[in-house]
Amino acid sequence: MPRFALTIEYDGAPYVGWQRQANGVSVQQRLEEAVAAINGGLRAVVHGAGRTDAGVHALGQIAHIDLARDWRVDRLRDAINAHLKPNPIAVLAARAVSEDFEARFSAIRRHYLYVIDNRRAPLALNLGRAWHVKRPLDAQAMHEAAQSLVGRHDFTTFRASECQANSPMRTLERLDVRREGERIEIAVSARSFLHNQVRSMAGSLEHVGSGKWRVEDLALALLAKDRARCGQVAPPHGLYLVAVDY
């Protein structure tokens, strides 16, 4: 059975997350329904690189599927997209891959972006696509504080209580904060993340930016290895899975 990798974009707002769940419709479910329609009615599991939570978006999620027959990749992309309508999910590209390619386990790096709209006025165009923070934020202080999290650390403070990972140890390769006008972007890269890690870090960085925390308080929270020391968990609608490296 030929295997294909898909690059996928989606608005996470209508879904319970990437993974199939009993409590609602997931991105994975909608993709598998579209794939079954072009695969002779046979179900093909769509394996994603990142199990994004409810409300989290993707610009470059990667998934792999095994199909009953070979396809020209542009026709495969278009056929799946035709059956995804009107869902806010789009296959941007498809490519043939070897049978040992695994979207999740072959990944060497994942890139996420957290977006904050830092303005007094309500959001219109970006409603549901950014965290609206009205109070002024110091992005430079946020960036300075963020550097204390780069490297290999025990991220217990920034790990959801229900996280099922075997270890809280993770290596952040990048955590940058920058401002462009009223938009603040938090860019983070690592091989893997703990459950709610990026949103927990973003929420704590907001505390630094607003002056509630000093720059050094973020490093102290990390060293505490205590979930109670996490500032807050930023809302899911500001988070994007941007790309996955192999």
Image (cartoon, rainbow, N blue to C red):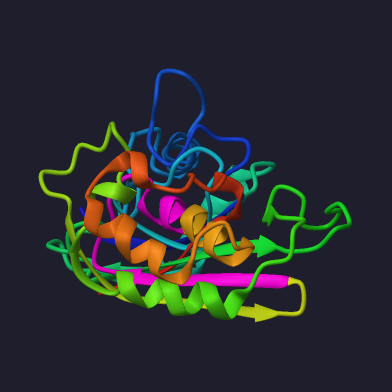
Nearest the camera: 200 or 35?
200
Location of residue 126 in the rendering, given as x and y in whole percent from the top left corner: 77, 57
Taking the image as shown, residue 40 lies to the left or right of residue 224, namely right
Is residue 186 in view from this perspective?
yes
Picture residue at 39% right of the left edge, 62% below the top: 218
**Does residue 44 appear in the picture of this structure?**
no
Point 62% across, 36% down: residue: 14
The residue range painted magenta reads: 183-201
Identity of the residue furthest to the top in this view: 22
Question: 69 or 161, which lies in front?
Answer: 161
**Taking 79 as reference, is 5 above or below it?**
below
Residue 75 appears at what percent x and percent y?
50, 64
Considering only vertical position in the picture, is 138 above or below 100? below
Asked where in the image residue 172 lies, by quadrant, the reply is bottom left
Residue 236, image x, y percentages:
54, 46
The quarter holding residue 114 reads bottom right
Which residue is found at the position 46% from the left and 44% from the top? 38
Residue 190 is a magenta residue: yes
Residue in the image at 51% along x and 53% along y: 203
Quarter the C terminus occupies:
bottom left
In the picture, measured across the screen, residue 75 lies left or right of residue 84, that is left
Above or below, comparing residue 157 to residue 243 in the picture:
above
Q: How many circles with numbers are drawn on the protein?
A: 0
Q: In the picture provided, is 214 more to the left or to the right than 212?
A: left
State the image coordinates of residue 164 (x, y, percent, origin top left).
Answer: 20, 37
Residue 63 in the magenta stretch? The answer is no
